[in-house]
């Protein structure tokens, strides 16, 4: 693992104009200034509740959405506003896995055609032919290569997700954006797919941006974790830091809200009141202040910067971060 | 519509059921959605009966010259000797005999059967050609407008609205004679090919809007689907997006709208011929025959009966088949 | 049951303040050998195949299963919501001593809403978009309280909205469902289900569509309301964590059959069925070794149209061979195992199971 980041994101922003008729009546600040790096072979988890902008971020990283401002650098090149032709060589190194295994495969194409699609649109002829490569990929993701000629409707949700993974791997990417890859699957199938992705990550040395709402899944997959709230990163750090020494009140609340099989009965959990505010009109200052039990006057006026504490790799955007208490004391008390 | 809708629906439910897919995969190898639709269509009695009838009609139309040869009577041959002094056919039921199966036209004494066969040929040709052209225009405009959006979408929408606002019948009434006049002058003998061409052109100008709207809506719905995004994320160009990803998913509704447009054009052609702006008397056509026969509604009902039944059967078969096709391609909509 | 009295005083009718320890026979809801079949052209789908359980007032039963396990079909059968033309239901369902199976539509409708109510996964589809939320709640009240006038019904609805934690209930009364956020909508849905003070509440994946922080609020709310109204709750979910948090008893379903039943401690702390083991060890946890691989259940959930012969779980079971050919031919019966009240449907012997559990499951450090 080198120190030179594979993906460098600075000030990434996406605003969607809200229109009524022809007039723009407002802005949805879906993503509002993100900074993060992903190094080669590293797995970064983006976690947050609905409306936090994690999916929009993922779409921007693979350039399915055009960023409003900020920059995305991939392998040293600025791809923020690159056109289709300029992106082409980079597309091969940057792929995406989708959430819905039913919508992400073209129902009119055979599995072979679906997996071969990235090769064909990029005019790549692998040694041994496309069919051999596709069958190799199917085998890699744990599917029967003989199923080459079958159609998506003949497969279960978990198998379909494997097909989507094989397609993402076809171009031998260096970075994969995985957008909630297991949340649409049955519980007993989720573990199969998480394990598969983990094996692939290790074997192929892939870097991942893993987007999920489930902190427990992220914990099993990611080395680094970024917690998002209303379009911003509120805390980013190594896995151990985030799960054992979370400093942002929101991270703590999120962790304590997850019902854990190992804890029976109502645990002494942190309760957030209310819902996530609308990104159409986010709160002033710290965006979390309306649900935060520690909020003071300064939180309403001044937006806290995402700053590392003690020169470490954990950065928290909070005026009153928890520095001392490890999470376990609070959660299991 | 269909006689056994339950089977089709249940089968489709089971096939699309994610839980059942493993079972399906074990039993059936590599059945495409198209093949499944074909199986459903084949299992639907209405579809089979109407489909066979349509094939029969088309063969009749195609083989018109051959039938003429075997039958031994031409569409323009006149049998004045078989008419009485008032120009009415001799014998029963409009002169039905072994030589003239559907009898003879009063007045000119032409054979109704062979004229019907040629009328079928004309009607089918006009309707199919018009449907093909409108589908092509509609699919092209609809796909581009839906997928690219922006100003192109706005322009296409505007043209669609404009076309829909134009009164079809009035323009057809005004335009057809004007065009004929422009090309042939007052006295020129209008060729039947020209008349047919003008009709097809009029249908094409007015008929594409519904297909364009349908396709545009479908494409917009598909555009946001993740498999389209996956292709985009792999760097696919416009051609791949349109022809490989989008079109294969919308040919089902296109096919249905095509199969329902054909009977519409058949009746429109008959209607236009009926009000006198369609084809001339030279070209055998359903509308023209019904128009001519109305004078004899009381004296020679058989003359009205045969063309009437024929056009009814043809349009009915097309509509039934279109509906069955819709059920087979999209089993969920039939409930 | 006339409850013209406003909340939160509730109704001091014949309900005991403290649940008396009663046998299964007297439980408020008793389901005995329930079988639900759908007839399709492809054959008979046995969506529920001989399931029995009971829930008393003040208790929460968690029904756990994956898609196609029959858990939702069971709840619809209790509420009498299946189309009688397509469905055959046999067995017994008794709600408050009254038999539901075979009851006339009219009678079931009277029970529904008054004695039993349902909370759906997606409140947006359960609430009518064209009427205000308050009006829908008030209507639900007036259906079972025809004597209540408009003002009383409104007051009752506002009280309910307040009770489920919706701020400014009087103003919210006149808003439409789309003006509510996801969490607020689910609260409104709960208010509507509770407006007639039902003794039995069935919640089908009530928090699956919600964010975790909101889910925590809703689960707390359900627990609070249960303490207050002393209702029997059935919570249907795929999330064992949620079950561990709120349920007293657990029923694990697979392929339309109950495979394990017991108290929440029994099922989650000393699970007996290999399927339950699989579920527990495949769920990622916030504790334990994050780098260890999850232990998934191989294969896919079965199709109810084509259920495996014998034990429905045997094609995915690691221990199927140990039980011999029985696993492929005989459907295992639900038998007592371990502590009292703990039932499991498995061909393996009790000692075998204990060994496998100790070696393969507990050692991985999942369930403690």
Image (cartoon, coloured by chain):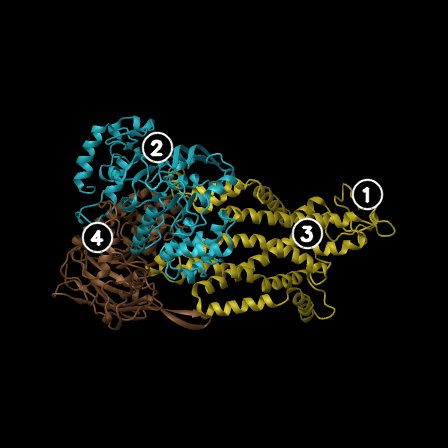
Q: Along the horizontal axis of the image, is C271 left or right of C307?
A: left
- Residue C145 rendering spot, x and y as whole percentages: 49, 48
Q: Which residue is mark 2?
A: C24
Q: Is residue C14 visible?
A: yes
Closer to the camera: disc 4 or disc 1? 4
Disc 3 crowd, CA 10 A, few/some/many (<14, 14-19, 20+): many
According to the image, label 1 marks what residue? Answer: B92
Chain given the colour yellow: B
Task: Report which quarter residue B125 is drawn in.
Answer: bottom right
Please name which of the two marks, 2 or 3, marks the residue nearer to the observer.
2
Q: Specify the subunit that label 4 lies on.
A: A
User: What mark, if any, has residue B29 been given in the picture?
Assistant: none
- From what the image shows, is residue B317 above or below residue B238? above
Q: What is the drawing colour of chain A?
A: brown
State the residue position of label 3: B118
What kind of element bears circle 4? helix
Give how far apart the Cα atoms at labels 4 and 1 are.
92 Å
């Amino acid at each position: 693992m080198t120190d030179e980041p594979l993906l460098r994101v600075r000030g990434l922003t996406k605003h969607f104009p809200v229109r009524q008729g022809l007039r723009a009546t407002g802005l949805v600040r879906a993503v509002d200034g993100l900074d993060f790096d992903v190094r080669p072979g590293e797995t970064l988890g983006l976690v947050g509740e609905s409306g936090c902008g994690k999916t929009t971020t993922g779409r921007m990283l693979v350039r399915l959405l055009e960023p409003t401002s900020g920059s995305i650098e991939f392998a040293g090149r600025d791809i923020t506003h690159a056109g289709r032709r300029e992106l082409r060589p980079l597309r091969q190194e940057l792929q995406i896995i989708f959430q819905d295994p039913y919508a992400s495969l073209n129902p009119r194409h055979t599995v072979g055609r679906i997996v071969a699609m990235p090769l064909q649109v990029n005019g790549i002829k692998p040694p041994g032919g496309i069919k051999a490569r596709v069958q190799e990929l199917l085998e890699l993701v744990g599917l029967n290569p003989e199923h080459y000629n079958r159609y998506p409707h003949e497969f279960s949700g978990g198998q379909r997700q494997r097909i989507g993974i094989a397609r993402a791997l076809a171009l031998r990417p260096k970075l994969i954006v995985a957008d909630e890859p297991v949340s649409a699957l049955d519980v007993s199938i989720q573990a199969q797919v998480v394990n598969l992705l983990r094996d692939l990550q290790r074997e192929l040395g892939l870097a991942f941006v893993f987007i999920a709402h489930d902190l427990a899944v992220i914990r099993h997959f990611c080395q680094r974790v970024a917690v998002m709230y209303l379009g911003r990163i509120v805390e980013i750090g190594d896995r151990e830091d985030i799960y054992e020494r979370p400093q942002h009140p929101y991270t703590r609340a999120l962790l304590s809200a997850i019902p854990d099989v190992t804890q029976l009965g109502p645990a002494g959990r942190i309760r957030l009141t209310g819902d996530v505010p609308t990104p159409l009109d986010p709160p002033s200052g710290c965006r979390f202040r309306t649900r935060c039990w520690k909020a003071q006057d300064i939180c309403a006026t001044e937006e806290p910067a995402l700053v590392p504490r003690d020169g470490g790799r954990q950065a928290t955007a909070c005026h009153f971060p928890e520095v001392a208490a490890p999470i376990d004391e609070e959660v299991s008390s | 519509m269909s006689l056994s809708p339950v089977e089709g629906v249940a089968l489709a439910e089971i096939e699309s059921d994610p839980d059942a897919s493993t079972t399906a995969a074990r039993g059936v190898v590599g059945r495409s959605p198209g093949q499944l639709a074909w199986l459903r269509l084949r299992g639907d009695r209405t579809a089979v009966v109407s489909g066979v009838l349509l094939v029969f009609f088309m063969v009749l139309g195609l083989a018109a010259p051959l039938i003429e040869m075997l039958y031994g009577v031409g569409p323009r041959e006149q049998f004045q000797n078989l008419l009485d002094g008032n120009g009415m056919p001799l014998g029963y039921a409009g002169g039905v005999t072994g030589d003239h199966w559907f009898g003879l036209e009063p007045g000119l004494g032409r054979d109704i059967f062979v004229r019907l066969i040629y009328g079928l040929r004309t009607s089918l040709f006009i309707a199919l050609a018009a449907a093909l052209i409108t589908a092509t225009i509609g699919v092209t405009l609809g796909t581009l407008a839906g997928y690219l959006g922006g100003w192109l979408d706005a322009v296409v929408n505007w043209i669609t609205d404009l076309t829909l606002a134009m009164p079809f019948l009035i323009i057809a009434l005004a335009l057809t004679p004007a065009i004929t006049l422009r090309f042939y002058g007052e006295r020129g003998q209008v060729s039947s090919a020209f008349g047919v061409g003008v009709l097809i052109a009029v249908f094409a100008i007015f008929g594409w809007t519904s297909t364009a709207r349908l396709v545009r809506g479908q494409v917009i719905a598909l555009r946001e689907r993740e498999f389209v995004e996956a292709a985009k994320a792999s760097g696919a160009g416009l051609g791949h997006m349109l022809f490989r990803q989008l079109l294969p998913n919308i040919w089902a509704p296109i096919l249905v709208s095509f199969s329902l447009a054909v009977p519409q054009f058949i009746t429109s052609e008959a209607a236009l011929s009926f009000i006198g702006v369609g084809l001339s008397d030279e070209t055998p056509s359903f509308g023209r025959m019904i128009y001519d026969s109305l004078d004899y509604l009381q004296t020679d009902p058989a003359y009205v009966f045969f063309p009437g039944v024929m056009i009814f059967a043809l349009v009915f078969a097309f509509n039934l088949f279109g509906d069955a096709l819709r059920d087979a391609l999209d089993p969920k909509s039939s409930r | 049951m006339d409850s013209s009295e406003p909340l939160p005083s509730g109704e001091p009718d014949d309900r005991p303040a403290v649940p008396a320890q009663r046998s299964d026979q007297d439980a408020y809801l008793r389901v005995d050998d329930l079988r639900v079949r759908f007839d399709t052209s492809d054959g008979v789908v046995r969506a529920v195949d001989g399931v029995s359980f009971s829930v008393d007032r003040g208790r929460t039963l968690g029904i756990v299963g994956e898609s196609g396990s029959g858990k939702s079909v069971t709840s619809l059968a209790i509420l009498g919501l299946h189309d009688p033309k397509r469905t055959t239901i046999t067995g017994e369902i008794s709600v408050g001593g009254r038999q539901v199976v075979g009851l006339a539509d009219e009678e079931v409708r009277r029970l529904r809403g008054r004695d039993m109510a349902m909370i759906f996964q997606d409140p947006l589809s359960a609430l009518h978009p064209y009427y205000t939320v308050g009006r829908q709640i008030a209507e639900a009240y007036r259906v079972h309280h025809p004597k209540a006038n408009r003002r009383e019904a409104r007051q009752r609805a506002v009280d309910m909205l307040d009770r489920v934690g919706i701020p400014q209930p009087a103003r919210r009364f006149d808003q439409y469902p789309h003006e509510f956020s996801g969490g607020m909508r689910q609260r409104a849905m709960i208010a509507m289900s509770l407006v007639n003070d039902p003794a039995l509440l069935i919640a089908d994946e009530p928090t699956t569509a919600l964010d975790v922080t909101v889910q925590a609020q809703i689960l707390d709310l359900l627990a609070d309301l249960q303490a207050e109204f002393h209702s029997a709750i059935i919570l249907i979910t795929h999330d064992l964590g949620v079950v561990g948090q709120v349920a007293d008893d657990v029923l694990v379903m697979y392929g339309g059959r109950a495979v394990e039943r017991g108290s929440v401690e029994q099922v989650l702390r000393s699970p007996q069925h290999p399927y339950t083991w699989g579920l527990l060890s495949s769920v990622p946890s916030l504790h334990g070794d994050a780098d260890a691989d999850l232990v998934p259940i191989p294969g896919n959930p079965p199709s109810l149209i084509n259920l495996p012969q014998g034990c429905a779980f045997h094609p995915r079971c690691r221990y199927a061979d140990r039980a011999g050919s029985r696993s492929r031919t005989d459907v295992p019966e639900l038998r007592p195992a371990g502590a009292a009240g703990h039932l499991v449907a498995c061909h393996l012997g009790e000692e075998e199971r204990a060994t496998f559990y100790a070696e393969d499951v507990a050692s991985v450090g999942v369930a403690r």
